[in-house]
Image (cartoon, coloured by chain):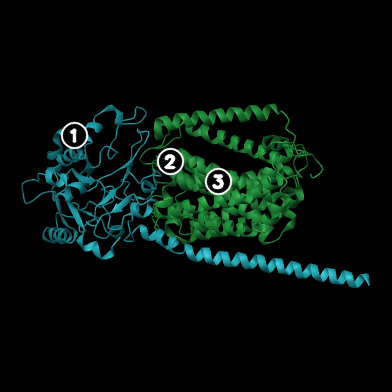
Chain colours: A cyan, B green
Amino acid sequence: MKKNAKHDYVAILFDSTRCIGCRSCEEACADENNSRKRLWTEKSTNSKRKPPQGLSADKWLHMNYHKLPMADESKRRPFDWEEATELMEEKQYTFVRNACMHCVEPACESACIVGALKKQENGAVIYDPDKCMGCRYCMIACPYKIPKWEWHEALPYVRKCTMCYPRQQEGKIPACVEACPGNGVDGEALVFGSRYQLLYEAEERIHKNKDRYYPHVFGRDELGGTGVLFLLPKDFTPVMAGFPENLGKRPIPSYSRSPQATVPYWVGGLGTFFASLTWIIQRRQKLMSDKEEETSEKGGK
Amino acid sequence: METTQQPKGLFKQLIQGPGQAFKYHPIFTSLFVLSALAFLGVAVYRFSYGLGVTGLNDNTAWGLWTAFKLSLVVVSGCAFVLTGMVYVFKMEAFRPLCRSAALMGLLGYSTFAITLVFELGWPWRIVHPIWMHNYHSILFEIAWCVMLYLTVLSLEFVPNILEKFNKTGLVKWYKKLIPSFVIAGIILSVLHQSSLGSLFVVSPYKLNHLWYSPWIGPFFIISAVFCGLALVILMEIFMARFNKRKARLSLLSKLAYYSIPFLGLYLGFKVMDVLERTPAREAFGRMDFFTLIYILEIGGGILLPMILFGIKKIRESIRGLVFTSLLVVLLAGALNRLNVSVIAMDHSPLGYSPTFVEYLYVPATLMLVIGIYIILTRLFPIDPEGTPQ
């Protein structure tokens, strides 16, 4: 991965205070990635398993609803899709985008044994199905649990959001961003653009409206930064939004880099150590047996 | 050996070779055939329907088979430990056990590879790491080490074949190469045994902090030493019982004795590790299911065997050795690997329960491996002292 290319990465800014929960992005994603058909057939839900709730191999973008902290919990109504927008206006619930984060330093890329998952020059992390051998180490490595597996297939692939890389190659913006209608106030819940500009814009939004936002752009430096930036409502912590607890700034690949970098030294060091040990012990034994022979010869005389 | 007449034909030579009389053994044969059938059944079912036949899901990408694989590798540490003792440290007393340990290693790693084929989504792409490289991946290093180590173990097996067919000159020449194989084997073992632990350093936000440690690599390699020793003890006692001979108790109690410092080292490191890291202390203080299973693993698999092996009377009795070695292999070896790869990984406790196929695969494969081990010890001069002539 080119370190100096980080500035050029594209990103998606998700402002959950502006999201109205219409799920147009989900639909657009399913249409674009040709998974709508598969999602709504019975085959995708293996009869032994529950139907996919949240992300699955056939659903690369999922909008999770979460309870917003309320002063009076007794007023909270149970969630209902019919009145989702109302509930959100009343600040009872909020939506959070759940899809690949396109990390600046992706754990899956560093984990993949054959390099099937690769960070592209524009920042999208995409998957090469021809390389994948199906070890599922990416699923273990991803801290956000994004890569999903086609459990129902005899020859399965890993599936996840590509940030619409093919569309981007054609000069278009990701389908979910295009589909996002916004709430008619000032702009849309999803914005696509250069990561640096979006970070600037996100900070600006927080600065201008401190009562509305949680005072941190999630994804600015979590695990080295992500390609999807999150603006969350006030008093709504990233942990409430379903992100892992105590996320540090250290990128996941750096955890495996240190043991990996020392491999040549271990080979050289251990090789020299055991070879010389063998030689020394052999020589000592030989000297001892020579000595014994000598003494026995002397004794013989 | 030289006195027996060599029958004509390779196959006849193989099965009628010097003194390796085959006798029909009803229990052994039926178990072997049954497990072979079960194995075949699982293979057909899994390869025709894909991994949907297992209980795995998106939250639990690795399950029982992964834990089984890791456990196989940890007990296969016996190969590098015993060959190292004999060829590097020149403990000639253990030479009779050396070849059987190397064979156990070879079979263990072969089973590892076969289980991996069962687990992979695209089984025939198992060779991809040979020409598709990602140097950042720990799994990539493991793939190469295991491939190379399987080669080394096969090379270490060659003298058995040469001796079987009485190629005395070749054997003499070949045996000069063995020490270099042994050293290569030790290096490769240290690398991939520890890397199998380091596999999990990339999941600091998923693995329970009692097990997640920056030192998980060293833990894995140390546990390979004492689990390997315990497997040698178990296998020798089992083979003695099977062949109706006396087990070489003096050797075994020495092996048990040697494993005490490694158990102690591991115990010390583990305790320090939990005391040192704040999240681990917190996880221990929670006293939940994970703490209990951690205590079972460390107390039952490390501390108790340390005490038991330390008592001379237990160390020198067959029952004591079997019981204690079983504790080590099952609790410190298998349970630890199961915890790291499945139980303590981040998912709801009921999110994964292995299906019947997954369960069936484990005992069937184990039985098959033991059967193949017995057959090979009869066919080749692996352990001429311990096999009926």
Q: Position of residue B338 (x, y in %)?
A: 50, 44
Identify the residue under disc 2: B124
In this orientation, which residue lies closer to the viewer: B285 or A99? A99
How far apart, in angstroms, are the residues tagged by discs 2 and 3? 18 Å
> What's the residue type where badge 1 is placed?
Asp
Q: Quadrant of residue A260?
A: bottom left
> What's the residue type where badge 3 is placed?
Tyr
Q: Is residue B46 visible?
A: yes
Q: Does residue A176 appear to the left or right of B94 in the view shown?
A: left
B139 to A36, vertically: above or below: below
Query: Which of the labelled discs sits on residue A80, or is there none?
Result: 1
Instruction: Identify the residue at image location x=67%, y=28%.
Output: B27
How busy is the neighbourhood of tag 3: few (under 14 within 10 Å), some, or many (20 plus)? Answer: many
How far apart, in angstroms, are the residues tagged by discs 3 and 1? 54 Å
In this orientation, which residue lies closer to the viewer: B123 or B221? B123
> What's the residue type where badge 2 is placed?
Trp
Q: Quadrant of residue B61?
A: top left
On what subunit does the disc labeled 2 rest?
A: B
Q: Position of residue A294 (x, y in %)?
A: 85, 72
On what subunit does the disc labeled 1 rest?
A: A
Query: Which of the labelled discs sits on residue B109, or is there none?
Result: 3
